[in-house]
Image (cartoon, rainbow, N blue to C red):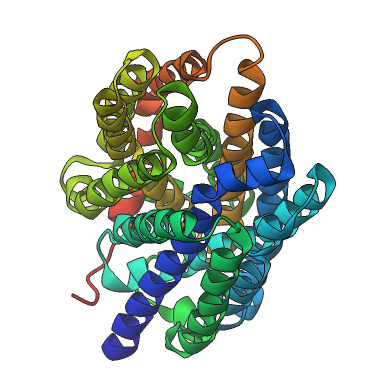
Amino acid sequence: MERSVRAARVATYVYFVLCGTLMGTWVVHIPAIEARVGISHATLGGLLVVLGLGAFTGMQVAGPLTDRLGARIVVPAGGILCGASLALPGLARDPWTLAGALLVFGFGNGCLDASMNAHAVHVEKAYGRPVMSGFHATFSVGGVLAALAGTGAANADPNPAVGMAATGAAGIAIAVVSAQALLPAAAAAETPGPGSGSGSAAEAGASPAETHRSIKGRVWLLAVLALMVMLCEGAANDWSTLHLKDVLGAPAGTAGLAYGTFAAAMTIGRLLADRLSARFGSMAILRYGAATAAVGITLVALGPWIWAAFTGWALFGLGLSGCVPQLFSAAGHADPAAAGANVSRVAGLGYVGMLAGPAVIGWLTHLVALNHAFVLLTLLCVTTAVAAGILRIGSDHTRESEMAPGVH
């Protein structure tokens, strides 16, 4: 069993890298696609809503399916669909075809995201210690790889569809090859952990209906926090490159590295977050992370220099890095038998924030400059830091009670 769990962990890393690379490839090609289709920032913001709606729908479909059919079926299927649809935005010629392409790509990305996170919860149970942030770190690695490869491809070939199609094809092959190492449905259900889905010792004496309501309320609380954090993350994903290019006048190659800086900082933070979470608790990760992110995005909004923007995006990524993994992990462990459904709820509402962030920033550019629109993100980060204490309710205690000695 230990060998299969280790193999499943490696495969989960692969899928997180794959998901980050596919999404990052889209992100770094946004300026080229925006110019090719001939749309404004505001119109792009509206079209990004379609991407988020597709992702939200995919998550709600894939989460329960993962609980029912198992990760070996749903995770690679999501990877194949996401890879196959990656080139579609690069082929778009007008806003309508771009909207359709983003809807399909978003759906595939949502299927992959929810199913691989649900599988990650079972792997974390088997290890008996926090490992979720490590998985999310490899997602950020994928973003860094996409930023580097995409910047080079943009300089070599102005047609975004070519590089996107090549990346998508490689993604399909990786999704198929890695599938067999995932935990089968039966093994996932048997991994060490609480198993009862009770959520915490305080609920042990409650009736099943009361326990269900308590877990459901906790999950939606985590979802609201995810919405706020992922709204900020989504804004960085879709506007960081354009910020350097349009506000600070950076060349295209330099502007593309803004997202890479953000993603690299996310990677570093997530590599550290599991150890910090085990020592200080998820509430501290959320509170101090959100505060650091607030400082970073304020520097981006007000700093007139390129070096200040890179510093700000790095702090923003570092601060946000550990927040989402803690929320996803807490949701999955709230009821292991419904890990996919619960993760899909938190991830789904988080993606409402992910899609709303870019759209709101885009609409705000009608009123203020792009960098000044980022002040909204400062306010959200400060609010998250202040409200982080509510994560203590049923979160740290639940994780501690669920983590049993496992694979090391």
* Front residue (pair 98, 276): 98
Give above or below for 118 relative to 303: below
- Residue 18 position in % (x across, y down): 46, 68
Q: Residue at x 54, y 35 (%)?
A: 227
Q: Residue at x 66, y 55 (%)?
A: 106
- Residue 359 position in % (x across, y down): 65, 30
Give above or below for 156 relative to 68: above
Q: Is residue 359 left or right of residue 4?
A: right
- Residue 104 position in % (x across, y down): 74, 60
- Residue 251 position in % (x across, y down): 40, 37
* Front residue (pair 226, 321): 321
Q: Residue at x 48, y 41 (%)?
A: 237
Give above or below for 161 relative to 279: below
Q: Quadrant of residue 245?
A: top left
* Front residue (pair 256, 367): 256
Quadrant for the N terminus, please. bottom left
- Residue 88 visible here: yes
The residue at the far right in this view is: 96
Q: Quadrant of residue 134?
A: bottom left
Task: Count numbered badges in the picture.
Answer: 0
- Residue 338 visible here: no
